[in-house]
Image (cartoon, helix red, strand yellow):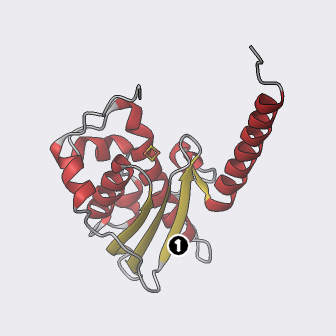
Amino acid sequence: MSSRIPLAYNPKVLELFRNPKNLGRMEKPDAEAVAGSLACGDMIAVFLRIDRVTQTITDAMFESYGCAANIAASSIMTVMAKGKTLEEAWQISWKNISDELGTLPMIKSHCGILAVGALRRAIRNYFLDKTKPAWIPESPTPDERHAVEEERLLEVLAKRAKRMEAELGQDSKGGKTG
Ligand code: FES
């Protein structure tokens, strides 16, 4: 029998999970980032269209490879980012996202952190070939560190899979006989 208890998502999370806004891949975005969570292995990709003169986000889209909270948090993040300047969008926190969703279950707060981290990574990426403004810190923020780059996530997941394989191999060799 499964011991998993269904999570109590509020109606807004469920609605965005079923009908996510801004879901999809953007053609030729001005900035993008793919980021994954080491906590669960889920990933999201964020795409931004940016007005270069006003530095305003005119469009934001996402792709999600994750849970219901990941999809809802990414979706609301894109809704919140649209129309904001890059500096304003940088200030969006996982708490803002959780509040906007009407709270996420505590165990799912990392899903909101992943959405914020991916957005910040996309904004940071936008300035890779430009003069970085002073409001972007030199070192990655905790949200950015949580939302690791795709390569790093795949590397860690591959290591975990190897370790599990080795453990399962050990179990089957040294299985109990009575
Ligand atoms: Fe990992 Fe939701 S469980 S992003």
Q: Which residue shows up at 58% across the image and 72% down it?
A: 131
Amino acid at dot 1: Tyr
Residue 149, image x and y in percent? 62, 58
Which residue corresponds to mark 1?
126
Which quarter holds ligand 1? top left
Residue 94 placement: quadrant: top left
- Is 144 positioned to the left or the right of 2 in the image? right
Residue 93 versus residue 24 in the image, above or below? above
Instruction: Name the residue at the front extreme.
Output: 178
Instruction: Name the residue at the left extreme.
Output: 11
Residue 66, image x and y in percent? 44, 53
Q: Which residue shows up at 56% across the image and 48% down it?
A: 41
Q: In which quadrant will I find the N terminus?
A: top left
Count the labels in the image.
1
Can residue 106 be seen by looking at this rendering?
Answer: yes
- Is 139 positioned to the left or the right of 9 in the image? right
Q: Which residue shows up at 51% across the image and 51% down it?
A: 42
- Is 54 positioned to the left or the right of 120 in the image? left
Q: Label 1 neighbourhood size at 10 Å, few (<14), some (14-19), many (20+)?
A: many
Residue 69 versus residue 16 in the image, above or below? above
Residue 40 versus residue 119 in the image, above or below? above
Residue 70, image x and y in percent? 39, 51
**Nearer-the-camera pick, 83 or 151:** 151
Residue 21 versus residue 169 in the image, above or below? below
